[in-house]
Amino acid sequence: MNHPSRLAVDRFALGLPSPEVEAHLAACPECRAHLAAVGARLPVPGWVRSSAGPRWAPRSPLVAGFVALAAAMAVLLLRTGTTTSEPATTAKGPPAVTIWLKRGAAVAAWDQKSPLRPGDSIRIEAAPAGFGYVTVVSTADSAVKTLFTQALNGSGRPVLTPAWELDARGTEEHLAVLFTQAPVDEAGAGALLGRRDAEAWCLHEVLPKESP
Amino acid sequence: MGAPDIERWYHGYFALIREKCRRMLGDRDEAQDLAQDTFIRLWRAQLPLGDARTVTTWIYKTATRLAIDRLRARTVREAHPPSEDVDPGPFGLVSARRRIVGLAGSVPADELAAAVLDRLDGLTHAECAEVLGVSERTVRRLLERFDARVAAQEASP
């Protein structure tokens, strides 16, 4: 019997239609067993959840002052509002922002005072508290530039941005994290800076940087 | 992008990855280890969930490359490879795997990858070409070279 490739059966198992594979499976217990094996719903082991940390995005020319970073990292958090030893996981209360920071190979918590250094990398974790969209913008030099935006699908779960590496330009990075009920473009984001109500909630972060 | 998200990916793809790794390595423990490595790379690759064609191509390519690295390390590290404890399947798996393992330390990686996909996974030349990102002609050439090496090895005293 000529069997379809394992790739063909795997794709069929994942929902790609194939009349040839379907016809073969009807007559081949061996391939049906493979189909069952790849479709098995396995219990989720602990290493999976512990691997659910930050996913580092590919490099991205999002805005002057930042480039995306691909690297592993441990955690630190700086929260607007409350500080906790766990990343934000709740949708209760107002929206909150967690900044994850990596400096070289070491990770340390930013004390909200010490200047960050060129080469430091950050990711922002935004707990939306029921808002439908999160948008991160740079507000340097009074110009609003969108760095990241994502619909939240009502999950209430935190959203993690790509990683951005700080360059040596300037003495501060100004970021605003906007939580909104509707999507916003750059022009609309500028009008929402500082707003905090049921339709939009803005958290502004100023990150001081060491002079080169 | 937290635990619930990665669990969806796990339920969607891990069993498939594990089966693929078992076919390549023949040892359940080593295959499980490789499957975890492949899955974590898949999770970090940020491929579109639900795009079965893209994801399976990525899995086959990445898992194959990682398996070849392990097979080569195995030939250096161990005089005796792990025992075969996986269902041989429909493609003459055990004998094909022995040939591939026996040549892993001396055959170029692209030849090994083509041999893994063709002989262990039963891929067509077109599917091999898709996974490896080469032409079908190149796949045929890689397999011919691999077969020539196998023949030479079997002919040697």
Image (cartoon, helix red, strand yellow):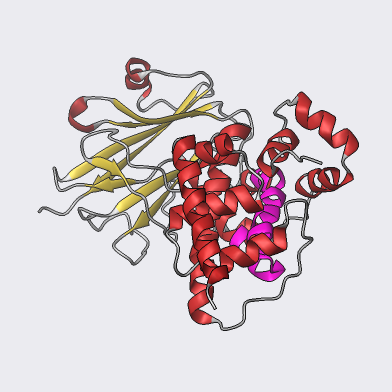
Q: Is residue B29 magenta?
A: yes
- Looking at the rendering, the stretch of residues picked out in magenta corresponds to B8-35
Let me know if residue B79 is in the magenta part: no
Residue at the outermost bottom position: B79
Q: Position of residue A163 (x, y in %)?
A: 37, 46
| Image quarter in which the C terminus of chain A is found | bottom left
Indicate left or right for B57 with B105 as reference: right
Taking A154 as reference, is B24 above or below it?
below
Quadrant occupied by the N terminus of chain A: top right
In this rendering, would A22 be left or right of A54? right
Tell me the residue at 51%/21% (across/down): A199
Q: Residue at x 84, y 29 (%)?
A: A23
Q: Residue at x 51, y 66 (%)?
A: B152
Q: Position of residue A91 (x, y in %)?
A: 61, 40
The x, y position of residue B134, in whole percent, is 44, 38
Q: What residue lies at 71% left-to-right and 67% top-to-bottom?
A: B28
